[in-house]
Image (spheres, rainbow, N blue to C red):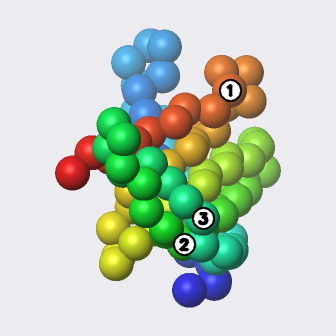
């Protein structure tokens, strides 16, 4: 479902102090796509794009969801590091 939601991260900085970052995230469902769910298995899942903003920057996520479960996700926490691909195996 499209909409907005808050996302809050609690991180330790380089001096072991707690840093709290909050974002407002826009959730946008897209079309269904084929995604890998195992070594040689594929299925169709709904693509959901999530873009989060705060005054310090932005985060982006792409999730593939089927029956309320995230099957695969691409997450970019820091543009300097590039995206992280996550495949959830059954």
Q: Identify the residue at image location x=63%, y=83%.
A: 3
**Residue closest to the eye, 13 or 59:** 59
Q: Earlier in the sequence, mark 1 or mark 3?
A: 3
Image quarter for residue 48? bottom right
The answer to whether residue 19 shows anywhere in this view is yes
Q: Earlier in the sequence, mark 2 or mark 3?
A: 3
Residue that carries the numbered disc 2 in the rendered image = 46
Q: Residue furthest front?
A: 40
Separation of disc 2 and disc 1 at Cα? 23 Å
Q: Is residue 1 rendered to the left or right of residue 65?
A: right
Residue that carries the numbered disc 3 in the rendered image = 33
Which mark is drawn over residue 39?
A: none
Q: Position of residue 69 (x, y in %)?
A: 33, 68
Q: Identify the residue at image location x=73%, y=21%.
A: 80
Q: Identify the residue at image location x=43%, y=34%.
A: 11
Q: Within 10 Å of the Cα at label 3, are there few (<14), some (14-19), or many (20+) other Cα atoms? A: few
Q: Position of residue 38 (x, y in %)?
A: 32, 44
Q: Within 10 Å of the Cα at label 2, are there few (<14), some (14-19), or many (20+) other Cα atoms? A: many
Q: Position of residue 21 (x, y in %)?
A: 55, 47
Q: Identify the residue at image location x=67%, y=47%.
A: 59
**Residue closest to the eye, 6 or 68:** 68
**Residue closest to the eye, 12 or 27:** 27
Which mark is drawn over residue 82?
A: 1
Q: In the image, is residue 40 above or below residue 49?
A: above
Separation of disc 2 and disc 3 at Cα? 6 Å
Q: In the image, is residue 27 above or below residue 3?
A: above
Label 3's element?
strand
**Residue closest to the eye, 39 or 79:** 39
């Amino acid at each position: 479902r499209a909409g907005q939601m808050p996302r809050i991260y609690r991180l330790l900085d380089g001096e072991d102090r707690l840093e709290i970052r909050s974002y407002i995230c826009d959730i946008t469902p897209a079309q269904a796509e084929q995604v890998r769910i195992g070594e040689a298995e594929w299925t169709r899942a709904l693509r959901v794009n999530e873009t989060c903003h705060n005054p310090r920057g932005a985060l982006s996520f792409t999730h593939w969801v089927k029956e309320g479960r995230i099957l695969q996700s691409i997450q970019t926490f820091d543009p300097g590091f590039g995206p992280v691909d996550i495949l959830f195996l059954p």
